[in-house]
Amino acid sequence: MTRHDWTLDAIRAIHDMPLLDLVYRAATVHREHFGDNKVQLCSLLSIKTGGCPEDCKYCPQAARHRTEVKYQGLMDVGEVLSAAREAREAGATRFCMGAAWREVKDGPQFDRVLDMVRGVKALGMEACCTLGMLSDTQARQLADAGLTAYNHNLDTSPEHYAEIISTRGYGDRLKTLQSVRDAGIQVCCGGILGMGESIDDRCSMLQVLASMTPHPESVPINALVAVDGTPLEGQERVSTTEMVRVIATARILMPTSMVRLSAGRLQMSEEAQLLCVMAGANSIFFGEKLLTTGNPEYAEDMRLFESVGIRPLEPDVHAPSA
């Protein structure tokens, strides 16, 4: 039964189960609701990079952090759709477009994003955006353009949030998510592990997600990739067992959501990735650099899936080629 009334103590009890028991329970829930070994392949493209006024301690795109990320203005529609076609040819069924903005501004740039969404949908792919905070009107415009899902992560628990971000509040994030939901767009919302949070913080974040009605259709679980020049550059990597515990707990709490193994995957061993899939992750992200034909990382992903009998969800074969 899908529930929205999980207590923090109940979530912590699930999270702290013996690992093999936890993975077994999560895998059982996954089988009950999905019944297959298929994994959705998603492609993420940064359509506007750097220069963000926010102060998120984990993010190399914040203008106030001294990182090697170079500013890039909003891409042209044609460039984005070319990348989407390439992603589809590589097997991606969802194309995610991210812009380093604090919030969407009405005007020519937002209109350009709407054209990108229409173009991605015309290719037969799911279209997802992450553009920062939205108004109700902007959410409705994105819905009218055909947007499948909007990503707006909570990042961490309400209790730990102020330690990571000061330029917007937790309530701001929840308001944007409500605007997305009210517009009829699917919600993509998860968090980041490894930012100095406690186990209770991780469970509290999952409690907020699982209390949403309905649950987010997509729950990305990210491992912090500590980037030089950010305030979190010295953080240690999250262990495999930590990732598996949160993914398995998310699967049990939100049985019908797509749980996405997101940032940090490329730093994980093959065995760690497979354990995450076994624990209930049924979607992975390709970085934009993994989409070139013959790219060894892409080929390795496909080899790994084939060797263990995991099948990617197939793109829409009836979609137009241009």
Image (cartoon, grey):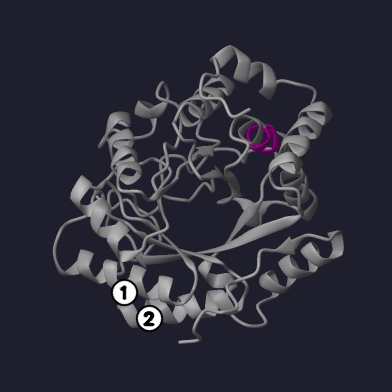
Horizontally, is 158 left or right of 234 in the view?
left
Q: State the residue lying farthest toward the top.
A: 9
Question: In this orientation, does residue 73 appear?
Answer: no
Q: Which residues are magenta?
A: 242-248
Q: Amino acid at mark 1?
A: Met
Crowding at dot 1, Cα within 10 Å, few <14 / some 14-19 / many 20+, comes out as: some
Cβ atoms at labels 2 and 1 below 8 Å apart? yes
Q: Amino acid at mark 2?
A: Glu
243 part of magenta stretch: yes
Please state, as top left, top right, bottom left or bottom right, where the N terminus lies in the image: top right
> Badge 1 is on which residue?
75
The foreground one among 243 and 179 is 179
Horizontally, is 176 left or right of 290 in the view?
left
Residue drawn at 77 percent across, 38 percent down: 27
Q: Give the quadrant of residue 169.
A: top left
Horizontally, is 279 left or right of 117 in the view?
right
Counting from the top left corner in percent of width and height, residue 314 is at: 65, 69
> Badge 2 is on which residue?
79
What secondary structure is the magenta-colored segment mainly? helix
Residue drawn at 30 percent across, 48 percent down: 183
- As helix, strand or loop, the secondary structure at mark 1 comes to loop
Residue drawn at 57 percent across, 73 percent down: 316
Question: In this orientation, does residue 190 appear?
Answer: yes
Cα–Cα span, label 2 and label 1: 7 Å
167 part of magenta stretch: no
Q: Give the quadrant of residue 142.
A: bottom left
Counting from the top left corner in percent of width and height, residue 28 is at: 78, 36
